[in-house]
Image (cartoon, rainbow, N blue to C red):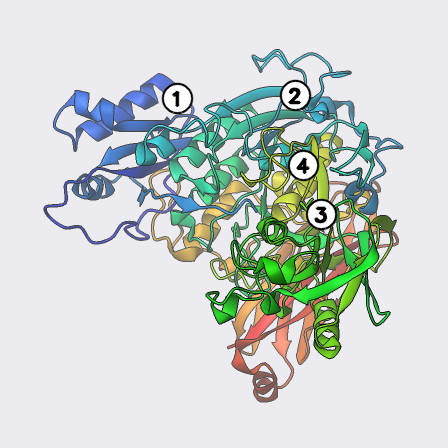
């Protein structure tokens, strides 16, 4: 069988499907991963080798061809096919096969008038980038509403010759549905479009945040946040690859096909605002595999880190070749004040335009629940849970937790209520999500919830309140600060890689929206909007992707690793409770577009460095084109712009190198550090002398416990402590976070 020469990446790691029953003949979808292509075979020849591979386990050539779902023929080498477990097992035994992955529907969580100005990028005044900015192409993963004004062709130059479309802004659009339909059957047209068009709103929102044109007088429903909406890279081209079909379900084979096409089409930045519902190993993670192949072509891949915080160890999309983003808050508030009957003023937030100036009766949902409602749900305002005779004409306090926020308001309205207060629990802290409700509404933090509940109890059935007309306020609290929902480290899959990498605005972001999707995404909501608020690391991701596109334009020769390094330089931020946050929340810190263009030094890495990292991860042999050395470099020596050391046992010396990219070739950088408590951090050499731009200097970083016994006691329970080190000249500060736990 004539198989093209490949670069297998994960041979000998593990079998990626459960033990097989001998008589199990059910067809399932498997991805047969063959590594990377060489340049000597055409796509048609590669397709034939995939057919040949399938024919070796099928009864006929016709059956083999009919079983093929996708043939990955560009950067990724492999195919997706309908196979029995026995056939998959036979393919896994072939020398040229790197891995066989059983596909299943994965629940991938779909993880602005103010956010760019807040981040220090004044687009209204113009951002001086290279003319090549107009050639940059980017990827969005969930479809797009092409009629949105944010994607206007006005003022854009002709379509690049390598693209076949006629639109100047959205120069390409594809969709991927074969995996979905193989599993579920033909797509129901009421669930989603059988096209690249966005029916959900998520893809349009993230694409507009990334590369939307400047649109004046944009606002959410009710006129909130009115101003000039813009993406961070408004002159960038946009290519759309829709592989999230209906809800939050994605299939590995669809995602790999989208990334394979995007790389072949020549996109330069890939923004992916989705992630698995749990951290995945590299060989089980199609997004990680696709991103590795993107890194080989020097494509920057930026991904959201997940919305499962504040639980530790929940961050996803964590391999070192992905730039992983957490979500932070801005300083903008949409204040909706609640005035309680005792005169206490609670400053909540709302984007529901209303005015309830007169004092009205106030009741807790727990005091108005129907008798059949379980005790743990009485305060949730779930559908058909409230007694109309107790609610009619009143303002109701509904706790978040179970059910959707929007349907809580629908239930209050059904029962005759005239307004409601959406109250946070302790776990939700200060994370307040804004959406236009069907009734006058104010959302409040946990501390504010406690004040309201305390008043209701003291009023003994005579509580009252009024909701003031909302107003938009800038600088209403110190910012940035981390969102509690943003997934946190440590990195449970790649423990020597600190994740997330960086934080960006991700709470209550205004951007373009699909007019096929109501602002709340719920079928009960019949409204349509052009712009909408949304929150999540999904919204933070395109902010950083846009910055990567800007850096690509300014520094077209930089590698994807150099661009990531340039972005990972910033200052500390605080979390929503006012405490100092840790790098497991914000990575290197809040991204700063104005600083990233001139970082001074960068930590560079190549595709080969990533292969060596995978060798250290557990690989014994990577195939005929790339054989793992007998003693590969340890994982902690990957040249990454941050340091994570799990289970330190006394002392560890780490290798790093930096490349001079500052404007002045002659530069001298001095080392400094703030070690984790109980540690010392030293560099050798501690002074770096550069004589030209592009010069690379190596150094070692030694982390040592001052008193091993005392430090282990202090670090008891496996907890991490944090610090940082930096290189400084007269202008630049190149800072890297450190996370250490004791063994």
Q: Nearer the viewer, mark 2 or mark 4?
A: 2
- SS assignment at label 1: loop
CA distance separating discs 3 and 2: 23 Å
Q: Which residue is mark 2?
A: 147
- Identified at 61% across, 52% down, the residue is 405
Q: Is residue 429 visible?
A: no
Describe the element under mark 4 as helix, strand or loop.
loop
Percent position of residue 403, x then y:
53, 55
Q: Earlier in the sequence, mark 3 or mark 1?
A: 1
Q: Could you tell which of marks 3 and 2 lies nearer the N-terminus? A: 2
Residue 148 location, quadrant: top right
Q: CA distance from mark 2 to mark 4?
A: 34 Å
Q: Is residue 492 above or below residue 543?
A: below
Measure how far apart labels 3 and 1 are at the Cα level. 49 Å
Q: Which of the two discs, 3 and 1, sits closer to the camera?
A: 3
Q: Which residue is mark 1?
A: 40
In this figure, which residue is indicated by the disc labeled 3? 508
Q: State which tag comes first along the sequence, 2 or 1.
A: 1
Q: Residue at x 70, y 59 (%)?
A: 394
Within-10-Å neighbours for mark 4: few <14, some 14–19, many 20+? some
Q: Are marks 3 and 2 in contact (CB under 8 Å)?
A: no
Reading the chain from its start, which is encountered first: label 4 or label 1? 1
Q: Earlier in the sequence, mark 4 or mark 3?
A: 3
Residue bearing mark 4? 558
- In the picture, the quarter occupied by the N terminus is top left
């Amino acid at each position: 069988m004539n198989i093209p020469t490949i670069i297998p990446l994960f041979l000998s790691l593990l079998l990626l499907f459960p033990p097989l029953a001998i008589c199990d003949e059910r067809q399932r979808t498997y991805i047969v991963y063959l590594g990377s292509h060489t340049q000597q075979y055409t796509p048609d020849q590669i397709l034939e080798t995939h057919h040949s591979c399938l024919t070796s386990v099928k009864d006929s050539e016709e059956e083999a061809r009919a079983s093929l779902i996708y043939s990955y023929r560009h950067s990724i080498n492999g195919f997706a096919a309908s196979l029995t477990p026995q056939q998959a097992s036979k393919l896994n035994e072939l020398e040229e096969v790197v891995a066989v992955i059983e596909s299943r529907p994965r629940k991938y969580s779909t993880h602005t008038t103010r956010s760019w100005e807040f981040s220090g990028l004044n687009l209204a005044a113009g951002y001086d980038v290279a003319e090549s900015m107009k050639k940059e192409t980017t990827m969005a993963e969930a479809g797009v509403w092409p009629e949105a004004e944010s994607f206007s062709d006005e003022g854009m130059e002709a379509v690049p010759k390598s693209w076949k479309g006629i639109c100047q802004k959205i120069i390409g659009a594809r969709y991927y549905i074969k995996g979905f339909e193989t599993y579920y059957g033909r797509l129901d047209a009421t669930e989603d479009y059988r096209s690249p068009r966005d029916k959900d709103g998520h893809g349009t929102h993230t694409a507009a945040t990334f590369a939307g044109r400047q649109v004046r007088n944009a606002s959410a429903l009710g006129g909130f946040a009115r101003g000039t909406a813009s993406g961070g890279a408004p002159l960038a081209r946009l290519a759309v690859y829709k592989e999230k079909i209906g809800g939050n379900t994605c299939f590995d084979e669809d995602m790999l096909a989208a990334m394979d096409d995007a790389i072949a089409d020549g996109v330069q930045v890939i923004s992916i605002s989705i992630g698995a519902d749990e951290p995945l190993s590299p060989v089980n993670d199609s997004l990680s595999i696709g991103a590795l192949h993107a890194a080989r072509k020097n494509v920057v891949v930026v991904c959201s880190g997940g919305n499962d915080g504040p639980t530790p160890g929940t961050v996803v999309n964590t391999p070192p070749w992905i730039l992983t983003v957490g979500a932070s808050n801005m300083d903008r508030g949409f204040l909706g004040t609640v005035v309680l009957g005792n005169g206490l003023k609670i400053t909540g937030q709302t984007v529901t335009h209303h005015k309830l100036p007169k004092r009205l009766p106030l009741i807790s949902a727990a005091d108005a629940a129907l008798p059949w409602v379980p005790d743990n749900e009485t305060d949730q305002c779930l559908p058909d849970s409230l007694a109309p005779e107790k609610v009619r004409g009143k303002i109701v306090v509904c706790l978040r937790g179970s059910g959707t926020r929007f349907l809580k308001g629908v239930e209050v309205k059904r029962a005759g209520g005239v307004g409601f207060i959406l109250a946070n629990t302790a776990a939700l802290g200060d994370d307040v999500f804004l959406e236009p409700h069907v009734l006058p509404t104010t959302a409040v933090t946990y501390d504010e919830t406690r004040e309201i509940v305390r008043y209701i109890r003291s009023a003994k059935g005579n509580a009252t309140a009024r909701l003031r007309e909302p107003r938009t306020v800038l600088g209403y609290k110190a910012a940035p600060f981390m969102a509690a929902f943003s997934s946190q480290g440590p990195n449970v899959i790649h423990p020597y890689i600190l994740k997330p990498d960086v934080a960006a605005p991700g709470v209550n972001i205004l951007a373009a929206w699909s007019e096929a999707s109501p602002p709340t995404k719920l079928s009960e909501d019949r409204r349509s909007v052009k712009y909408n608020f949304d929150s999540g690391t999904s919204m933070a991701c395109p902010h950083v992707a846009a910055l990567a596109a800007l850096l690509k334009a300014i520094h077209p020769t930089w590698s994807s690793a150099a661009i990531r390094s340039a972005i990972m330089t910033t200052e500390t931020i605080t979390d929503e409770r006012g405490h100092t946050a840790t790098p497991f929340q914000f990575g290197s810190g809040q991204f700063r577009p104005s600083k990233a263009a001139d970082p001074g030094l960068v930590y560079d890495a190549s595709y080969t460095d990533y292969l060596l990292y995978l060798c250290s991860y557990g690989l014994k042999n990577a195939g005929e084109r790339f054989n793992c050395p007998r003693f590969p470099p340890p994982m902690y020596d990957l040249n990454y712009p941050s340091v994570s050391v799990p289970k330190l046992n006394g002392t560890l010396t780490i290798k790093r190198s930096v490349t001079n990219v500052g404007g002045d070739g002659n530069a001298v950088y001095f080392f400094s550090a703030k070690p984790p408590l109980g540690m010392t951090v030293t560099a050798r050499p501690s002074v770096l002398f550069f004589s030209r731009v592009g010069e690379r200097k190596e150094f070692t970083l030694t982390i040592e416990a001052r008193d091993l016994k005392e430090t282990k006691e202090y670090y008891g329970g496996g907890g991490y402590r944090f610090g940082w080190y930096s290189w400084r000249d007269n202008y630049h500060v190149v800072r890297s976070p450190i996370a250490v736990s004791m063994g």
